[in-house]
Protein backbone atom coordinates (compact mmCIF):
# COMPACT_ATOMS: atom_id res chain seq x y z
CA UNK A 1 0.00 0.00 0.00
CA UNK A 2 2.86 2.39 0.89
CA UNK A 3 4.51 1.73 -2.49
CA UNK A 4 1.24 2.52 -4.27
CA UNK A 5 0.84 5.80 -2.37
CA UNK A 6 4.45 6.75 -3.05
CA UNK A 7 4.05 6.00 -6.76
CA UNK A 8 0.83 8.01 -6.89
CA UNK A 9 2.48 10.98 -5.25
CA UNK A 10 5.30 10.81 -7.77
CA UNK A 11 2.85 10.72 -10.66
CA UNK A 12 0.83 13.61 -9.32
CA UNK A 13 3.84 15.78 -8.64
CA UNK A 14 3.74 18.91 -10.81
CA UNK A 15 6.87 21.03 -11.08
CA UNK A 16 6.86 24.70 -11.97
CA UNK A 17 10.37 26.04 -12.60
CA UNK A 18 11.35 29.64 -13.12
CA UNK A 19 14.88 30.92 -13.51
CA UNK A 20 15.57 34.18 -11.73
CA UNK A 21 17.74 36.81 -13.42
CA UNK A 22 21.36 36.99 -12.25
CA UNK A 23 22.01 39.80 -9.78
CA UNK A 24 24.61 41.80 -11.73
CA UNK A 25 25.81 44.33 -9.18
CA UNK A 26 27.04 42.05 -6.38
CA UNK A 27 28.29 38.54 -5.81
CA UNK A 28 25.05 37.06 -4.44
CA UNK A 29 23.16 35.34 -7.25
CA UNK A 30 19.98 33.28 -7.51
CA UNK A 31 20.37 30.56 -10.08
CA UNK A 32 16.83 29.19 -10.10
CA UNK A 33 13.63 28.96 -8.09
CA UNK A 34 10.66 26.64 -8.41
CA UNK A 35 7.50 25.32 -6.83
CA UNK A 36 6.29 21.71 -6.72
CA UNK A 37 2.61 20.89 -6.22
CA UNK A 38 1.42 17.63 -4.72
CA UNK A 39 -2.34 18.06 -4.65
CA UNK A 40 -3.98 18.33 -2.17
CA UNK A 41 -1.30 17.77 0.46
CA UNK A 42 1.63 20.08 -0.04
CA UNK A 43 3.39 22.83 -1.94
CA UNK A 44 7.19 22.76 -1.91
CA UNK A 45 9.31 25.78 -2.84
CA UNK A 46 12.96 25.34 -3.87
CA UNK A 47 15.87 27.65 -4.58
CA UNK A 48 19.43 27.43 -5.84
CA UNK A 49 21.79 30.34 -5.07
CA UNK A 50 25.49 31.12 -4.84
CA UNK A 51 27.88 33.80 -3.63
CA UNK A 52 31.64 34.37 -3.23
CA UNK A 53 31.07 34.20 0.53
CA UNK A 54 28.77 32.00 2.58
CA UNK A 55 25.04 32.50 2.22
CA UNK A 56 23.78 32.80 5.78
CA UNK A 57 20.05 33.40 5.50
CA UNK A 58 17.28 32.31 3.13
CA UNK A 59 13.68 33.35 3.69
CA UNK A 60 10.52 32.68 1.71
CA UNK A 61 7.62 35.13 1.65
CA UNK A 62 4.32 33.93 0.20
CA UNK A 63 0.70 35.01 0.04
CA UNK A 64 -2.59 33.67 -1.32
CA UNK A 65 -4.83 35.29 -3.91
CA UNK A 66 -8.04 35.72 -1.93
CA UNK A 67 -10.60 38.34 -0.99
CA UNK A 68 -9.80 40.27 2.18
CA UNK A 69 -9.12 43.66 3.68
CA UNK A 70 -5.38 43.40 4.27
CA UNK A 71 -2.59 41.68 2.40
CA UNK A 72 -1.34 38.83 4.53
CA UNK A 73 2.25 37.84 3.79
CA UNK A 74 3.57 34.67 5.40
CA UNK A 75 7.27 34.10 5.96
CA UNK A 76 9.35 30.95 6.39
CA UNK A 77 13.01 30.78 7.48
CA UNK A 78 14.80 27.89 5.82
CA UNK A 79 17.13 25.66 7.81
CA UNK A 80 20.43 24.96 6.01
CA UNK A 81 24.20 24.93 6.55
CA UNK A 82 25.76 28.25 5.44
CA UNK A 83 27.72 27.76 2.26
CA UNK A 84 28.80 29.58 -0.91
CA UNK A 85 26.36 27.38 -2.85
CA UNK A 86 22.93 26.65 -1.47
CA UNK A 87 20.30 24.27 -2.84
CA UNK A 88 17.42 24.07 -0.44
CA UNK A 89 13.63 23.83 -0.23
CA UNK A 90 10.73 24.46 2.10
CA UNK A 91 7.57 22.34 2.21
CA UNK A 92 4.24 23.91 3.03
CA UNK A 93 2.30 21.10 4.69
CA UNK A 94 -1.30 21.95 3.82
CA UNK A 95 -2.70 19.35 6.19
CA UNK A 96 -1.92 21.85 8.96
CA UNK A 97 -4.30 24.44 7.52
CA UNK A 98 -6.96 22.07 6.21
CA UNK A 99 -5.97 22.40 2.56
CA UNK A 100 -6.54 24.88 -0.25
CA UNK A 101 -9.13 24.98 -3.05
CA UNK A 102 -8.10 23.97 -6.57
CA UNK A 103 -6.70 26.68 -8.80
CA UNK A 104 -5.77 29.16 -6.07
CA UNK A 105 -2.78 31.33 -6.97
CA UNK A 106 0.16 31.51 -4.57
CA UNK A 107 2.53 34.47 -4.95
CA UNK A 108 6.05 34.15 -3.54
CA UNK A 109 9.53 35.67 -3.41
CA UNK A 110 12.89 34.77 -1.89
CA UNK A 111 15.00 36.96 0.42
CA UNK A 112 18.70 36.10 0.85
CA UNK A 113 21.65 37.39 2.89
CA UNK A 114 25.32 36.47 2.69
CA UNK A 115 28.25 36.87 5.08
CA UNK A 116 29.35 40.15 3.46
CA UNK A 117 25.99 41.71 4.30
CA UNK A 118 24.73 41.70 0.75
CA UNK A 119 20.98 41.18 0.44
CA UNK A 120 18.93 40.02 -2.51
CA UNK A 121 15.18 39.84 -3.13
CA UNK A 122 13.88 37.91 -6.12
CA UNK A 123 11.02 39.23 -8.23
CA UNK A 124 7.63 37.87 -7.16
CA UNK A 125 6.62 34.66 -8.92
CA UNK A 126 3.29 32.83 -9.00
CA UNK A 127 2.27 29.19 -8.87
CA UNK A 128 -1.25 27.81 -9.23
CA UNK A 129 -2.25 25.11 -6.80
CA UNK A 130 -3.97 23.03 -9.47
CA UNK A 131 -5.46 19.59 -9.02
CA UNK A 132 -3.26 17.92 -11.63
CA UNK A 133 -4.67 14.46 -11.02
CA UNK A 134 -7.21 15.12 -13.77
CA UNK A 135 -7.10 16.60 -17.27
CA UNK A 136 -9.49 19.51 -16.96
CA UNK A 137 -11.60 20.98 -19.75
CA UNK A 138 -12.86 24.54 -19.39
CA UNK A 139 -15.98 26.46 -20.36
CA UNK A 140 -16.35 30.19 -19.63
CA UNK A 141 -19.43 32.37 -19.74
CA UNK A 142 -19.39 35.83 -18.25
CA UNK A 143 -17.55 35.77 -14.93
CA UNK A 144 -17.93 32.01 -14.43
CA UNK A 145 -15.39 29.43 -15.59
CA UNK A 146 -16.45 25.79 -15.32
CA UNK A 147 -13.82 23.03 -15.10
CA UNK A 148 -14.67 19.38 -15.73
CA UNK A 149 -12.81 16.22 -16.76
CA UNK A 150 -15.50 13.59 -17.31
CA UNK A 151 -18.50 13.90 -19.59
CA UNK A 152 -19.22 15.43 -22.98
CA UNK A 153 -19.20 19.13 -23.78
CA UNK A 154 -23.00 19.05 -23.64
CA UNK A 155 -22.74 17.95 -19.98
CA UNK A 156 -20.72 21.07 -19.15
CA UNK A 157 -23.03 23.28 -21.20
CA UNK A 158 -26.07 22.03 -19.29
CA UNK A 159 -24.38 22.80 -15.97
CA UNK A 160 -23.27 26.23 -17.20
CA UNK A 161 -26.83 26.98 -18.27
CA UNK A 162 -28.03 25.99 -14.78
CA UNK A 163 -25.36 28.27 -13.30
CA UNK A 164 -26.45 31.25 -15.37
CA UNK A 165 -30.11 30.56 -14.53
CA UNK A 166 -29.25 30.50 -10.82
CA UNK A 167 -27.51 33.86 -11.17
CA UNK A 168 -30.57 35.30 -12.91
CA UNK A 169 -32.97 33.95 -10.26
CA UNK A 170 -30.87 35.38 -7.46
CA UNK A 171 -30.72 38.79 -9.11
CA UNK A 172 -34.46 38.86 -9.78
CA UNK A 173 -35.42 37.86 -6.24
CA UNK A 174 -32.81 39.75 -4.20
CA UNK A 175 -30.93 42.17 -6.45
CA UNK A 176 -27.68 40.36 -5.64
CA UNK A 177 -25.29 40.08 -8.59
CA UNK A 178 -21.93 38.48 -9.24
CA UNK A 179 -19.10 40.95 -8.65
CA UNK A 180 -15.91 39.01 -9.31
CA UNK A 181 -14.96 35.89 -11.25
CA UNK A 182 -15.86 32.42 -9.98
CA UNK A 183 -14.21 29.06 -10.66
CA UNK A 184 -16.54 26.05 -10.65
CA UNK A 185 -14.83 22.63 -10.47
CA UNK A 186 -17.02 19.65 -11.36
CA UNK A 187 -15.60 16.39 -10.03
CA UNK A 188 -17.01 13.22 -11.59
CA UNK A 189 -18.55 12.03 -8.31
CA UNK A 190 -18.55 12.68 -4.57
CA UNK A 191 -15.71 10.19 -4.04
CA UNK A 192 -13.40 12.16 -6.33
CA UNK A 193 -14.51 15.38 -4.65
CA UNK A 194 -13.69 14.08 -1.18
CA UNK A 195 -10.32 12.90 -2.51
CA UNK A 196 -9.52 16.52 -3.33
CA UNK A 197 -10.04 17.62 0.28
CA UNK A 198 -7.83 17.26 3.34
CA UNK A 199 -10.50 16.61 5.97
CA UNK A 200 -13.70 15.78 4.04
CA UNK A 201 -16.96 14.91 5.71
CA UNK A 202 -18.50 11.61 4.60
CA UNK A 203 -21.55 13.47 3.34
CA UNK A 204 -19.63 16.16 1.42
CA UNK A 205 -21.17 16.68 -2.02
CA UNK A 206 -20.11 20.26 -2.65
CA UNK A 207 -18.25 23.09 -1.00
CA UNK A 208 -17.92 26.83 -1.57
CA UNK A 209 -14.55 28.45 -0.84
CA UNK A 210 -16.05 31.91 -0.55
CA UNK A 211 -12.84 33.89 0.02
CA UNK A 212 -11.22 32.25 -3.00
CA UNK A 213 -14.13 32.56 -5.45
CA UNK A 214 -14.18 28.80 -5.93
CA UNK A 215 -16.78 26.02 -5.82
CA UNK A 216 -16.08 22.28 -5.98
CA UNK A 217 -18.94 19.79 -6.48
CA UNK A 218 -19.13 16.09 -7.32
CA UNK A 219 -21.63 15.63 -10.17
CA UNK A 220 -22.08 12.67 -12.48
CA UNK A 221 -24.38 12.44 -15.50
CA UNK A 222 -26.72 10.24 -13.43
CA UNK A 223 -27.29 12.89 -10.74
CA UNK A 224 -27.21 16.02 -12.85
CA UNK A 225 -30.54 17.33 -11.52
CA UNK A 226 -29.20 17.17 -7.97
CA UNK A 227 -26.04 18.82 -9.29
CA UNK A 228 -27.95 21.79 -10.68
CA UNK A 229 -29.50 22.45 -7.28
CA UNK A 230 -26.12 22.02 -5.60
CA UNK A 231 -24.56 24.55 -7.97
CA UNK A 232 -27.32 27.06 -7.27
CA UNK A 233 -26.87 26.53 -3.52
CA UNK A 234 -23.09 26.92 -3.41
CA UNK A 235 -23.12 29.72 -5.97
CA UNK A 236 -25.49 31.70 -3.76
CA UNK A 237 -23.08 31.37 -0.84
CA UNK A 238 -20.35 32.95 -2.99
CA UNK A 239 -22.55 35.79 -4.23
CA UNK A 240 -23.85 36.49 -0.71
CA UNK A 241 -20.25 36.72 0.47
CA UNK A 242 -19.40 39.10 -2.35
CA UNK A 243 -22.42 41.27 -1.54
CA UNK A 244 -21.93 41.47 2.22
CA UNK A 245 -18.19 41.10 2.84
CA UNK A 246 -16.93 43.56 5.45
CA UNK A 247 -14.24 43.57 8.16
CA UNK A 248 -16.66 43.91 11.08
CA UNK A 249 -19.36 41.26 10.95
CA UNK A 250 -20.64 38.27 8.99
CA UNK A 251 -24.17 37.34 7.95
CA UNK A 252 -26.40 35.17 10.15
CA UNK A 253 -26.67 31.51 9.07
CA UNK A 254 -30.43 31.79 8.55
CA UNK A 255 -29.81 34.46 5.90
CA UNK A 256 -26.84 32.79 4.21
CA UNK A 257 -28.35 29.29 4.16
CA UNK A 258 -31.87 30.55 3.58
CA UNK A 259 -30.86 32.42 0.43
CA UNK A 260 -28.93 29.38 -0.80
CA UNK A 261 -31.94 27.13 -0.23
CA UNK A 262 -34.33 29.66 -1.78
CA UNK A 263 -32.24 30.01 -4.93
CA UNK A 264 -32.27 26.25 -5.52
CA UNK A 265 -35.93 26.53 -6.50
CA UNK A 266 -39.03 25.03 -4.82
CA UNK A 267 -38.19 23.53 -1.45
CA UNK A 268 -37.84 19.76 -1.41
CA UNK A 269 -40.45 17.58 0.31
CA UNK A 270 -38.02 16.31 2.96
CA UNK A 271 -37.55 19.82 4.31
CA UNK A 272 -41.26 20.67 4.07
CA UNK A 273 -42.17 17.56 6.08
CA UNK A 274 -39.61 18.39 8.77
CA UNK A 275 -40.87 21.98 8.99
CA UNK A 276 -44.51 20.90 9.25
CA UNK A 277 -43.64 18.38 11.96
CA UNK A 278 -41.80 21.07 13.94
CA UNK A 279 -44.83 23.35 13.69
CA UNK A 280 -47.22 20.62 14.84
CA UNK A 281 -44.99 19.62 17.75
CA UNK A 282 -44.35 23.24 18.76
CA UNK A 283 -40.56 22.93 18.46
CA UNK A 284 -39.72 25.63 15.96
CA UNK A 285 -36.25 27.10 16.35
CA UNK A 286 -36.19 30.86 16.94
CA UNK A 287 -34.61 33.26 14.45
CA UNK A 288 -32.12 34.29 17.11
CA UNK A 289 -31.06 30.67 17.61
CA UNK A 290 -30.72 30.28 13.83
CA UNK A 291 -28.13 33.06 13.96
CA UNK A 292 -25.70 30.54 15.45
CA UNK A 293 -24.15 27.56 13.61
CA UNK A 294 -26.69 24.86 12.84
CA UNK A 295 -26.80 21.62 14.79
CA UNK A 296 -24.82 18.60 13.58
CA UNK A 297 -27.81 16.36 14.36
CA UNK A 298 -29.64 15.72 11.11
CA UNK A 299 -33.14 15.85 12.62
CA UNK A 300 -32.45 19.37 13.93
CA UNK A 301 -30.42 20.57 10.95
CA UNK A 302 -33.23 19.69 8.53
CA UNK A 303 -35.55 21.93 10.53
CA UNK A 304 -32.90 24.69 10.60
CA UNK A 305 -32.49 24.66 6.83
CA UNK A 306 -36.23 24.44 6.23
CA UNK A 307 -36.91 27.34 8.58
CA UNK A 308 -34.18 29.42 6.95
CA UNK A 309 -35.80 28.89 3.56
CA UNK A 310 -39.17 29.79 5.05
CA UNK A 311 -37.84 33.01 6.61
CA UNK A 312 -36.34 34.19 3.31
CA UNK A 313 -39.51 33.24 1.46
CA UNK A 314 -41.57 35.22 3.99
CA UNK A 315 -39.39 38.33 3.71
CA UNK A 316 -39.29 38.34 -0.09
CA UNK A 317 -43.03 37.62 -0.51
CA UNK A 318 -44.11 40.26 1.99
CA UNK A 319 -41.48 42.98 1.59
CA UNK A 320 -40.01 42.44 -1.86
CA UNK A 321 -36.69 42.34 -3.67
CA UNK A 322 -35.61 45.89 -2.84
CA UNK A 323 -35.80 45.30 0.90
CA UNK A 324 -33.75 42.11 0.62
CA UNK A 325 -31.11 43.94 -1.40
CA UNK A 326 -31.09 46.70 1.21
CA UNK A 327 -30.61 44.08 3.94
CA UNK A 328 -27.59 42.61 2.15
CA UNK A 329 -26.15 46.09 1.61
CA UNK A 330 -26.67 46.95 5.28
CA UNK A 331 -24.75 43.85 6.28
CA UNK A 332 -21.99 44.95 3.88
CA UNK A 333 -21.64 48.06 6.03
CA UNK A 334 -20.86 45.87 9.05
CA UNK A 335 -24.20 46.12 10.82
CA UNK A 336 -25.23 43.85 13.68
CA UNK A 337 -27.92 41.25 13.02
CA UNK A 338 -30.59 43.15 14.96
CA UNK A 339 -29.39 46.50 13.66
CA UNK A 340 -29.65 45.46 10.01
CA UNK A 341 -33.18 44.12 10.36
CA UNK A 342 -34.28 47.16 12.36
CA UNK A 343 -32.89 49.58 9.78
CA UNK A 344 -34.41 47.83 6.76
CA UNK A 345 -37.63 46.26 8.07
CA UNK A 346 -38.35 48.06 11.32
CA UNK A 347 -38.06 44.99 13.56
CA UNK A 348 -35.22 43.02 15.14
CA UNK A 349 -34.69 39.24 15.18
CA UNK A 350 -37.25 38.71 17.92
CA UNK A 351 -39.78 40.80 16.03
CA UNK A 352 -39.11 38.83 12.85
CA UNK A 353 -39.48 35.60 14.79
CA UNK A 354 -42.89 36.63 16.11
CA UNK A 355 -44.47 37.64 12.81
CA UNK A 356 -42.86 34.86 10.79
CA UNK A 357 -43.90 32.08 13.16
CA UNK A 358 -47.39 33.55 13.37
CA UNK A 359 -47.65 33.37 9.57
CA UNK A 360 -46.63 29.70 9.66
CA UNK A 361 -49.30 28.78 12.15
CA UNK A 362 -51.92 30.73 10.22
CA UNK A 363 -51.12 28.94 6.95
CA UNK A 364 -51.16 25.47 8.53
Image: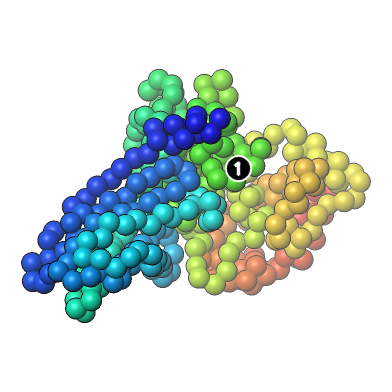
Camera sees residue 299: yes
Horizontal and vertical percent position of residue 189: 54, 28
User: Measured along the vertical axis of the image, is residue 320 above or below residue 157?
Assistant: below
Q: Nearer the viewer, residue 172 or 293?
A: 293
Q: Which residue, given by chain and number where applicable, does mark 1 sit on?
A: 200
* Residue sitting at the far right: 281
Name the residue: 75% across, 63% down. 288
Q: Would residue 177 appear left or right of 111 to someone viewing this image? A: right
Horizontal and vertical percent position of residue 63: 37, 61
User: Measured along the vertical axis of the image, is residue 111 above or below residue 209?
Assistant: below
SS type, badge 1: loop
Camera sees residue 236: no
Horizontal and vertical percent position of residue 240: 52, 54
To which quarter of the image does residue 30 belong?
Answer: bottom left
All told, the count of numbered labels is 1
Q: Nearer the viewer, residue 357 or 248?
A: 248
User: Measured along the vertical axis of the image, is residue 121 above or below residue 158?
Assistant: below
Horizontal and vertical percent position of residue 173: 54, 47
Locate the N terminus by quadrant.
top right
Disc 1 crowd, CA 10 A, few/some/many (<14, 14-19, 20+): some
Name the residue: 27% across, 56% down. 87
Locate the C terminus by quadrant.
top right
Q: Nearer the viewer, residue 33 or 242?
A: 33
Amino acid sequence: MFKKILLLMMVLCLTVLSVAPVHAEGQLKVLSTGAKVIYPNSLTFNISAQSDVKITEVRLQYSLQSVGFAQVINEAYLQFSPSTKVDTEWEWDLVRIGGLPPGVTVKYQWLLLDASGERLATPFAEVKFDDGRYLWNTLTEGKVTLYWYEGAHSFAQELMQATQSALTRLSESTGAVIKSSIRLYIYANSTDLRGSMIFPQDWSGGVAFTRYGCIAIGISASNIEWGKRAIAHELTHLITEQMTLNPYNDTPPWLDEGLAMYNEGPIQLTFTNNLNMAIQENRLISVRSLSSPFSAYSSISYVSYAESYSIIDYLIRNYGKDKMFALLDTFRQGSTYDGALQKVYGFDMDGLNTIWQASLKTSN
